[in-house]
Amino acid sequence: MRSNRAALRAGVSMAATLPMLAGALALGIPAAQAADTPARDTLAGTKPAWATTKADKGATADSARVTARVYLAGRDARGLAAYARAVSDPHSAAYGRYLGAKQAQARFGATKAQVAAVRKWLSSAGLEVTGVTRHYVSVTGDVAAAEKAFGTQLHNYAKGGHTYRAPARTASAPAALDGAVLTVTGLDNAPHKASSKDQLPPPDAVFKNSGPFSSYYGSNIATTLPDAYGHKIPYAVEGYTGKQLRAAYGAGAYTGKGVRVAITDAYASPTIAFDAATYAKKHGDAAWRTSQLTQVLPKNYTRTEECGAAGWYGEETLDVEAVHAVAPAADVTYVGAASCYDDDLLDSLSKVVDNHLADLVSNSWGDIEANQTPDLAAAYDQVFQFGAVEGIGFYFSSGDNGDEVANTGTKQVDTPANSAWVTAVGGTSLAVGKNDSYLWETGWGTEKASLSADGKSWTGFPGAFTSGAGGGTSKTVAQPYYQKGVVPDALAQANGAAGNRVVPDIAAIADPNTGFKVGQTQTFADGSQQYSEYRIGGTSLAAPVIAAVQALATEARGGKAIGFANPAIYAKAGSRVYHDVTDNPTGSGLAVARVDFVNGVDATGGLATSVRSLGKDSSLSAVKGYDDVTGVGSPAKGYVESWRR
């Protein structure tokens, strides 16, 4: 599931200079020193690239309303990043010396004096403070007050056939605040829309898979269908279960006992407890213990229609059932966001960190990097860094559109998976054989061709690209130290000689054609709501699977939190604890046959037969060593145990 980014920004005003002297004194800065400092500190990334002179439609009306968030830098932003790196690096003397949530806040969070000064600055400009958290001060007011506060004019700009408001120049904060402001979001309202407080809709319409199926890879060969790559191919699996995935990724006897996994998505499925319990019983997973599954939800939901709230029910269901299937003894906390917008998703992530709700967090959502901006990236990274110093690791799906060219026309990676402070999870096509044996994996990338009218060939074989694991080289995030020496220069330097972050870091099953079976209450044609099952995939599956494997690894190390895992993940690169995934492991080309209900429910609307080629991920390739589809590879036998050392 992909969030609809509300790329919110803001700025600061020259007119607030005198009031800032009072703010400076509140921060303990002598008046003479405050008067000598530069008037404003710019807040990089607060003017969007699309707000150009050519697109300028003129000033926004002074009376228009603005809602913004001023994110707080805290008392030691550089120290936070440095400590987050130190406790995450296996080569550091501070490795694993995590802080509690209260300790982290006391050491790196904003001081009361900083918050008071920021509030006074905003109020003096005529903005109304609507909320204060340990992360930000939220405000509302008219454009005139926002321009006064943030030192920039607001104009209307043409963008993609629409008109949006944005700062005419980079926003700034008074220098007298002495760096108390991290960034500001809210002046740019693209693609923000008016919110409304709605009730959650009922579950989506039912979806079912048609047969024939394979129960494991290759168990049912499509002997009556045409060859592909010179041989007969199997029908797609009906959907792997936890037992098969645990065997494929070397779970052994570990169950995740004593480990806490959080899941963030938007909204909340009203039937998740029933669905998860029913699914576990049907597929031989351990029964859920009392209070093993808990939810932390907002008071109200917003933008339910715009965000397709019911579609997020399946996301939560997939994540919860996948984590429990692979790590059946782990405690699971679902933290639902009020909407699919960044502000609300950031709030959900912050709840996990502020209350230390989990040891690791699975996140099956994101957007294209072009829709991310430096101000939002800074807000996300701050949360991730606080998580790192507390020993909390964040796992994000890398996306389902390959290099994004087919989807957006531009080669790019997804975000927040592009953050240097999260573990980006790529995707594979997985073959689990008889007796739950691991056969092979390819990078997830699908090309589809339909059966010809006479049934004797595949039309246009191998067909068109449909979906694949996201990956590639970031255009905005610098190469993190842990990727150096592992990620090939050809990838790291694809967008500049200095090198950039490459996605993903690790991978697991994602291909819907070799996917996971889930059980969910859905709405049937007669209006009834019934539990039913279907096969699903995407890196929305890979992320919770890897999070669950990491829960097993945490148990293996005696419950000691892994924290931000990337430095240790890359330290193991090239070893036997990973399956080194390549696109054509058998050397003969790989594909599966699928028969689907045309109407997604039953055969009354007819059947559609197709061939789905494996390992065809747009311009991305899974090769020996690190690659931009599967990262360092997928967990192999020995991976879980390797975290004991």
Image (tube, helix red, strand yellow):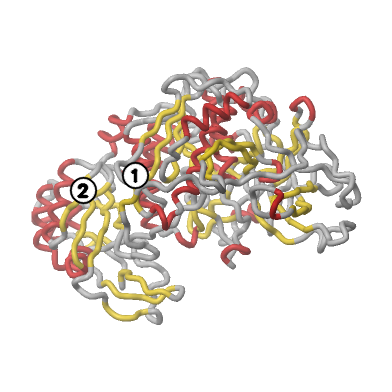
Tag of residue 131: 2
Please tell me whether mark 2 sits on a helix, a strand or a loop: strand
Question: Is 387 situated left or right of 463 in this image?
Answer: left
Q: Residue 556: percent from the left, percent from the top?
A: 56, 20
Q: Is 349 on the left or on the right of 432, as rendered?
A: left
For the residue marked with disc 2, what is the amino acid?
A: Gly
| Residue 637 picture quarter | top right
Callout count:
2
Residue 399 on image: x %, y %:
57, 51
- Looking at the rendered image, the quarter that the C terminus falls into is top right
Q: Earlier in the sequence, mark 1 or mark 2?
A: 2
Q: Secondary structure at mark 1?
A: helix
Q: Which mark is residue 504?
A: none
List the residue tagged with mark 1: 347
- Of 142 and 23, nearer the camera is 142
177, 463: nearer the viewer: 463
Q: Position of residue 332 (x, y in %)?
A: 46, 29
Left or right: where 290 falls relative to 69: right
Give the residue type at disc 1: Asp
